[in-house]
Amino acid sequence: MKATAADCRIRKMICCYTTIKYTGLLSNLLYMLLAIGVMAAGGLGLQMAQPNTPEHTYFVESLVLGATICTIIIFGCYGLVSDLLSVNIIFTGFILIVLGLEYLQLHNYQPHSRYKNTSQQLELLTVWHKLEKQPELMQQYEQQHHCCGYNNASDYKAMQLPIPKSCYQPGSDELLFTRGCQATLKHGRSRIEQRDKLFMWCIIGLEIFILVQTIVLSGLLYKLRRRERLARQQVPPGVRREPRANHVGSRTQLLDNV
């Protein structure tokens, strides 16, 4: 009865170990795809950033971090496939280091200059200053960005000018766009920055998930190895010992030795 209960516990541990193992492989695959995305974004940003600027440094760090993550993932997948406890422990340490680097990357986040809408800001100032001579330019800008005036519709009243049709929402002659074009630019930049930070937090969340998986996996692998050693020590003298497996892949050997 005791042997049967022990067999059930070992089967459950092996089943749990196998589930976490393959789930960990899928998580690492997703992690690598995100790392490749970070490298691609860093490469594109690096081409447009000016040298010796915080933006240039930020994108160089993104490339280095993405390449480091890919290398660590390959190392971690090797540990998962080969069922090596030492490799899994080292991989856990690497994930902790990457987590710290990711936090510093998020803390020092520097959006690219194109996110700051510098060109659009200049365009808005140009068409607004030409309002009296070429009002159609401002109207076209308002139609494209769904805004009204530089700050809001009251700008036209202050200049004693009629509110153009471009300030009204499509299909309505009464509902004005309440947001000015300047506020629209700031809102667009804020959305892009929030999206980038959300992407970074998703990577950090996935890293924490992989870290927990690796810790649990290492604990299960340690217990299975210890049970295997105890089972081998209990073999009576004179009985031929089975060759030790390289990894926890032989369930039959482990169960038979208990």
Image: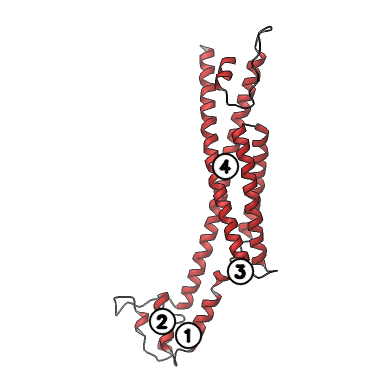
- Percent across and percent down for residue 18 are 53, 31
In the depicted structure, whether residue 244 falls above or below residue 20: above
Q: Are marks 1 and 2 in contact (CB under 8 Å)?
A: yes
Within 10 Å of disc 1 (Cα), the crowding (few <14, some 14-19, many 20+) is many
Whether residue 53 can be seen here? yes
Q: Is residue 212 left or right of residue 229?
A: left
Q: Secondary structure at mark 1?
A: helix
Whole-percent x, y for residue 59 in the image: 63, 62
Q: Cα distance, mark 1 to mark 2?
A: 9 Å
The three-letter code of the residue at mark 3 reads: Met
Quarter of the rendering containing residue 171: bottom left
The mark that comes first in sequence, 2 or 4, is 2
Secondary element at image label 3: helix
Q: Are marks 3 and 1 in contact (CB under 8 Å)?
A: no
Residue of label 1:
127
Amino acid, disc 4:
Ile
Alpha-carbon neighbours of circle 2 within 10 Å: few (<14), some, or many (≥20)?
A: few
Instruction: Say which residue label 4 marks.
Output: 210
Q: Is residue 5 left or right of residue 100?
A: left
Q: Residue at x 51, y 16 (%)?
A: 5
- In-image side of 148 versus 200 (left or right): left
The alpha-carbon separation of the residues under discs 1 and 4 comes to 52 Å
In the foreground, 17 or 30: 30
Count of numbered circles in the view: 4
Q: Position of residue 252 (x, y in %)?
A: 55, 19
Q: Which residue is mark 2?
A: 140
